[in-house]
Image (spheres, rainbow, N blue to C red):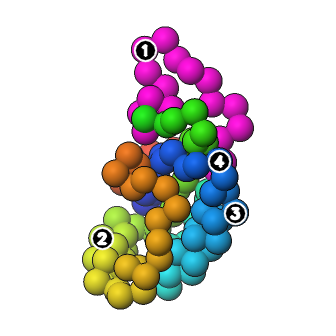
Amino acid sequence: MNYIDGFVAAVPAANKEVYLAHAKQVGALFKEFGVLRMVECWGDDVPEGKVTDFRRAVQAKEDEVVLFSWVEWPSKEVRDAGWKSMMEDQRMRAFPMPFDGKRMIFGGFQSILDA
């Protein structure tokens, strides 16, 4: 099965269009380096939990929206090589971040069910 990189971030609500433009630019590079699919989801119904929740996980402020995103790779090997190449590519450094990347959480996930 495919390999997934997942991301959760807090994006200023006023930056929605700026973020979408950023995601489209970065997405083109991701695909160049092997990503099969990229999905960006703008928080619409993100409730506050009693112990933890998405907003707390990324320290979202009142004027920020939680973004949930993932990219799908054909394998972990392609993902590892793709990330290495992307981080060395000067074009990645040219994209301004329309959110605070220090509060983004992310990780790689091995698919165990795709129903």
Whether residues under marks 4 and 2 lie with C-beta atoms below 8 angstroms apart, the answer is no
Magenta stretch in the rendered image: 41-58
**Which comes before the other along the chain, label 3 or label 2?**
3
Q: Earlier in the sequence, mark 1 or mark 3?
A: 3
Query: In the rendered structure, which disc, 2 or 1, sits on the residue that comes first in sequence?
Result: 1
Q: How crowded is mark 1: few (under 14 residues within 10 Å), some or many (20 or more)?
A: few
Numbered badge on residue 51 = 1
Tell me what residue is drawn at x 67 percent, y 56 percent: 16
Q: Which amino acid does label 1 sit on?
A: Val
Residue that numbered label 3 is attached to: 17
Dot 2 surroundings within 10 Å: few (below 14), some, or many (20 or more)?
few
The Cα–Cα distance between marks 3 and 4, rounded to whole angstroms, is 9 Å
User: Which one is closest to the eye, mark 4 or mark 2?
Assistant: 4
- Left or right of 78, for residue 71: right
Spot occupied by residue 113 in the image (x, y as percentages of width and height): 52, 44
Of circles 2 and 1, the one toward us is 1
**Where residue 13 is drawn, which disc sits there?**
4
Amino acid type indicated by mark 4? Ala
Image vertical order of residue 80 relative to residue 12, above or below: below
> Does the magenta stretch mainly form a helix, a strand or a loop?
loop
Residue at 48 percent of width and 47 percent of height: 9
Mark 4 / mark 1, whichever is N-terminal? 4
Nearer the observer: mark 4 or 1; the answer is 4
Check disc 2 and report its element: helix, strand or loop.
Answer: helix
Residue 21 inside the magenta-drawn segment: no
Residue 80 badge: 2
Give coordinates of residue 93: x percent, y percent: 37, 79
Vertical comparison of 24 with 8: above or below: below
